[in-house]
Image (cartoon, helix red, strand yellow):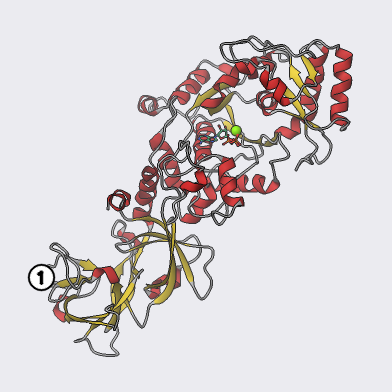
Amino acid sequence: MALTENSEDTEKKSLNFIEVAVDADLKAGKNGGRLNTRFPPEPNGYLHIGHAKAICMDFGIAEKFGGKCNLRFDDTNPVKEDVEYVDSIKEDIKWLGFDWEDRLYYASDYFPKLWDLAIRFIKEGKAYVDEQSAEEIARQKGTPTQPGLESPFRNRSVEENLDLFERMNKGEFEEGSMVLRAKIDMASPNMHMRDPIMYRIIKHPHHKTGTTWNAYPMYDFAHGQSDYFEGVTHSICTLEFEVHRPLYDWFIDQFAGDDYRPRQMEFNRLNLTYTVMSKRKLLQLVQEKLVSGWDDPRMPTICGLRRRGYTPKSIKNFIDRIGYTKYDGLIDVSLLEHSIREDLNQTATRVSTVLDPIKLIITNYEEGKVEMLDAENNPEDISAGTHQIPFSRELYIEREDFMENPPKKYFRLSVDKEVRLKNAYIVKCTGFKKDDNGNITEVYCEYDPTTKSGMVNSGRKVKGTLHWVSANHCVPVEVRLYDRLFCVENPSEEKEKDFRELLNPDSLRILTDCKAEPYVATVSKPGERFQFQRTGYFCVDQDSTNDRIVFNRVVSLKDSWGKIKNK
Ligand code: ATP
Ligand code: MG
């Protein structure tokens, strides 16, 4: 096993409750010392950050204890499923850095086996065809404190049941006209044990099995058995399945010997502030074009986060940080942002890009002269080296870095004030120009040639340092600034309003007139990440062309949300 004697004590402290249980099972020699988990997505949407939590658990625990993790698509509802989702799910799991090797399975692989089981249940008097409507069946369910009513079809003969079930599958009956139910206990305190539905009629081709079937197993009839068929030893899932567990166990107990049983364990779902995690709602956002697609960088999907500029490492660190518990809660999205900041701080090349440019003219700098200055690629990592940035008489700085009437403690540019231009010189502002509408169009300054960065005795200290680019050398780029997708912390909690009314109208701002230092153009390829000095972390978007680089803001340098909100 992966845990060695020496590391055991220290490792133990950091094990979560599921790891502790798995560790104990292995030590006790259960399942012959085998550990086999699975990640069981339904291919009815793209994976999101919540799924990443499940993936990190399922694949992570197998890795940690020398076991195996299967990828199994629980594809029991052909109406909602599609190969597009199958493909995207595989891509996202791989991107996160996990590998199912040759263990790719589909619940639909087991349709024949499940069918045989259903027949066996019928023959043993444990299942019956119910011809009541879904509404009627729901009405008879009872409540947790009141027993349900038995269906009038509950005691029909085995022959009749077999005949109807076969014909359900041949397509002789309409959808919704009948279902196959397990005959368990309509008075069970567990609602899931009150004669749950095993099969329903769906006349829709399946992405794997085509038109072979017209009767499809319910998720609850397929999931537990699929685990058993695959030899899954630990079936780890989210808390909402806790109440399904007795049913899964019951189904398996009806046919399995005492060889082994999958052990189901549940942990809390991930919910994040300012977003939604329901696949149904995410699908709605996509279909109604409220976002640009599943990979819109504002989406909590894995592909959205990837496009936004998140790294697998940052996502895994985030999942590690929030941990696994038995209580559902709401995690602050700023924790996720913290994780990517932490990662990119170590790895992202620092460059200068001016998002809202205004011209800065250094009146005492020789016209036509260009100096190549050294810029550090990453102060956190000296081995990352340096690159060169051209300096000249006309630069761009951020519009907000100059003020005509500055408040106290404004350490940027205003008339008669000094600042350092990053990697360059100290300059003193001498004036500015306004257009007829009163907009400032140019700022003037003089530089002090004795203050060049990096020079010994580079001179006096100033409080502010500004980033800049050379007007004649910079490249125009587009920058997409993202904010939270929703205006409220917990959109799913709002009872009064539809979640779509809670979308943040300012969640995307596109800046088309940004100026990047020329080095950026030489190293930018989609997915490449940078720190724009003083502004944030940015990632080259796939929409970039040879003529125009498009950047997504991954995250600002500091968590500014609180400040903005209170303004
Ligand atoms: P659906 O409503 O379609 O069932 P789902 O989010 O449960 O949606 P699945 O494809 O069934 O989607 O999920 C696959 C696995 O991911 C399940 O084991 C599920 O428990 C887990 N999972 C889903 N959402 C989360 C979440 N927010 N946090 C942690 N795990 C999750
Ligand atoms: Mg599910």
Return the x and y of residue 463 as percentages of the image width and height. Answer: 15, 65
Q: Residues within 10 Å of mark 1 (few under 14, many from 20)?
A: few
Q: Which quadrant does ligand 2 occupy?
A: top right
Which three-letter amino acid code belongs to the residue tagged 1?
Arg
Foreground pick, 354 / 156: 156
> Residue 551, relative to residue 487: is it above or below?
below
User: Going by the image, does 260 lie left or right of 512?
Assistant: right
User: Going by the image, does 259 lie left or right of 130?
Assistant: left
Question: Ligand 1 near label 1 (Cβ, under 8 Å)?
Answer: no
Callout 1 secondary element: loop
Return the x and y of residue 176 as percentages of the image width and height. Answer: 77, 30
Return the x and y of residue 331 as percentages of the image width and height. Answer: 40, 37
User: Going by the image, does 252 lie left or right of 267?
Assistant: right
Answer with the quarter of the image where residue 123 lies.
top right
Res. 445 visible in picture: no
The residue carrying mark 1 is: 460
Q: How many numbered discs?
A: 1
> Residue 555, relative to residue 257: is it above or below?
below
> Residue 366, relative to residue 431: is it above or below?
below
Res. 356 visible in picture: yes
Which residue lies most toward the bottom here? 367
Query: Residue at left 84%, top 12%?
Result: 156
Foreground pick, 549 / 26: 549
User: Going by the image, does 298 lie left or right of 169?
Assistant: left
Query: Residue at left 50%, top 38%?
Result: 50
Which residue lies most toward the front here? 496
Return the x and y of residue 433 as percentages of the image width and height. Answer: 24, 83
> Residue 304, relative to residue 328: is it above or below?
below
Query: Residue at left 32%, top 56%?
Result: 557
Answer with the quarter of the image where residue 418 lies.
bottom left
Answer with the quarter of the image where residue 479 lies.
bottom left
